[in-house]
Amino acid sequence: MENMQILVETNLVLLLAVFFFFLLSLLIWNISLHLDLKKIQATNREFFKGEKVKNMEEILLDQAKNLKALDKDIQELYKISNEINNLAIRGIHKISAIRFNPFKDVGGNQSFSIALLNGKNNGITITALYTKEGTRVYSKAITGGDSIGFPLTEEEREAIKMALLSEDKKKK
């Protein structure tokens, strides 16, 4: 025990220096942790600004509810978009009209052919032939850009071709 006492007495300054260094290290570490805690608290104040929330679990549950509601809205919008797309394909939006003179001896281009087509190139052609005796009107069903039951005249083919080209010009 005397040896230990002598050892402590001779190295007391060294022991006090080590203890002081250890104490100073702990103080610096404590200050560093305190500054980090202040940064985290400032971040939390910004994150929870304006809300009275007790914990993160409530925030996450609220966000999950919001995501479910948004997903439901997105699904509804997707359904509506598909319905609009189907209506757009079925609606007539390719239109063309050609005036012509079917008889060389009668003056004026008073006869006409009109092509009315939808997105799938289905629709009708309407042709009116003007003569001195009167006007005759004909219509033909069009499927896929061509008539199935009746042959098309040159003017009706031209009207269909122009209707198809008018749609291509709109896309550009």
Image (tube, rainbow, N blue to C red):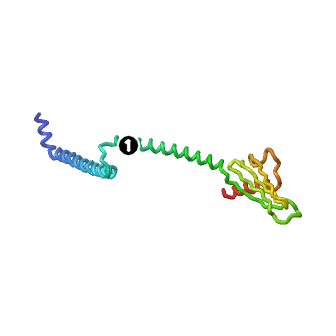
Report the residue that reaches farthest toward the left: 2
Quadrant the N terminus occupies: top left
- Residue appearing at x 26%, y 48% in the figure: 29
Residue in front for this viewpoint, 71 or 92: 92
**Relative image position of residue 96 (x, y in whole percent):** 73, 57
Quadrant the C terminus occupies: bottom right
Report the residue that reaches farthest toward the right: 105
Residue in front for this viewpoint, 130 or 73: 130
**Relative image position of residue 33 (x, y in whole percent):** 27, 48
Left or right, 9 with reference to 118: left
Q: Local crowd at mark 1 within 10 Å, few (<14), some, or many (≥20)?
A: few
Left or right, 96 with reference to 82: right
Q: Quadrant of residue 98?
A: bottom right
**Relative image position of residue 83 (x, y in whole percent):** 58, 45
Left or right, 9 with reference to 168: left
**Relative image position of residue 154 (x, y in whole percent):** 83, 55
Residue in front for this viewpoint, 86 or 49: 86
Left or right, 9 with reference to 149: left
- Residue appearing at x 29%, y 43% in the figure: 54
Q: Which amino acid does label 1 sit on?
A: Asp
Count up the numbered dots. 1
Q: What element carries label 1?
A: helix
Q: In which quarter of the image is residue 155?
A: bottom right
Identify residue for label 1.
62
